[in-house]
Amino acid sequence: MQGLLRQFLIAFVCLPFVTSGKTPTDSLGRSKLSYTTLLLMEAGGHLTAFTGLYFLWYKNYPQTKFHFFNDLPEWLQMDKAGHFYSGYWLTRLQTYVWKQTNHRNPALMGALWSAVAMTGIEILDGFSAKWGASVYDAIANFAGISLALWQETNPSITIFPSFSFHPVKYPDEYSERARQLFGTFPISLLKDYNGQTYWLAIGHKNWVILPAIGYSAEGMLGGTSNCWTENGTQICANIPRQRQFLLSFTINWKRLNVNWKYWKTLASVLNIIKVPGPALMLTLPEQRVEFYFAYF
């Protein structure tokens, strides 16, 4: 469950390394960074990030020999949607950084360095007795990275994932359990799968409004079940675990005609968040259909 949070930490630590420093000027007067310099900065940033993550996070838990762990049944696969999402956007960020160099294939370099970051987390997980390396996390990471790479080479079609979150009100008798699992806002943004929705928008490159398909889940107070042990007593929450599939729309901010030189960069950031809007939701296994005027 902590994978998405760790990926955000890696991106946060690496970003200053790969976007800082003075760069030479090319023949067109635009500042370009030597890709050899960027390669060294990437290596240094990742090494620093993984070292810091180990001492801040993993060192506090028992270590063991490298092993795999099957976490596919957990959290109704919401964590896999998170890995796909973070793999995509980390690759787009890395690609943007590599475009500041003269490298002939910045998209490929962005994908490779994203894979380094996300695979590194799985390796650290593999040595932790609390977790373990997940093949399914790696597959989700690879799918997100691959989509970002495909998007860079096929710009006529726009496809991107986005994220939305709504706070969840838990019954009083389970509120402490929820706090222990998910923390409080804003940490719950990254940890509370019950409040997260992951979207995939697709359409023509010139469309401002794009249809979006969403996936979420609710009623989860444990990875595979809603039973846990507290003070030697087993507790089971009488809350159904449910999947939700949604149909809505989102905005491709990059297609808005805004006369500001930094707009395209800001628009790329805005696209990671799904705008509130009308949504049709199918809840399973209840087979309940609901309509929301403004779902987020």
Image (cartoon, rainbow, N blue to C red):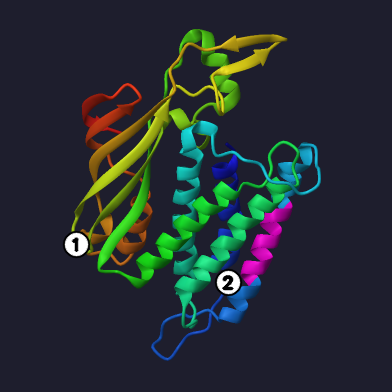
Left or right of residue 41, residue 79 in this image = left
Q: Where's the C terminus, which quadrant?
A: top left
Q: Judge whether 107 appears above or below 272 on screen.
A: below
- The residue range painted magenta reads 41-51
Q: What secondary structure is the magenta-colored segment mainly?
A: helix
Q: Which image quadrant for residue 59?
A: top right
Would you call the spot at circle 1 few (<14 residues within 10 Å), some (14-19), or many (20 or more)? Answer: few
Q: Judge whether 222 appears above or below 229 on screen.
A: below
Answer whether residue 7 is visible to the viewer in this image: no
Q: CA distance from mark 2 to mark 1?
A: 31 Å
Would you call the spot at circle 2 few (<14 residues within 10 Å), some (14-19), or many (20 or more)? Answer: few
Asked if the magenta segment contains residue 42, the reply would be yes
What type is the residue that disc 1 sits on? Asn
Answer whether residue 191 is visible to the viewer in this image: yes
Q: Earlier in the sequence, mark 2 or mark 1?
A: 2
Q: Where's the N terminus, which quadrant?
A: top right
Q: Which image quadrant for residue 118?
A: bottom right
Dot 1: what SS? loop
Q: Which residue is mark 2?
A: 21
| Residue at the (19%, 62%) spot, across then down | 257
Left or right of residue 211, residue 62 in this image = right
Q: Position of residue 188 (x, y in %)?
A: 50, 31
Dot 2: what SS? loop
Asked if the magenta segment contains residue 229, the reply would be no
| Residue at the (66%, 47%) spot, across then down | 133
Q: Which residue is mark 1?
A: 257
Q: Position of residue 68 (x, y in %)?
A: 68, 46
What type is the residue that disc 2 sits on? Gly
Could you say which is closer to the camera, residue 67 or residue 290?
A: 67
| Residue at the (35%, 58%) spot, across then down | 268
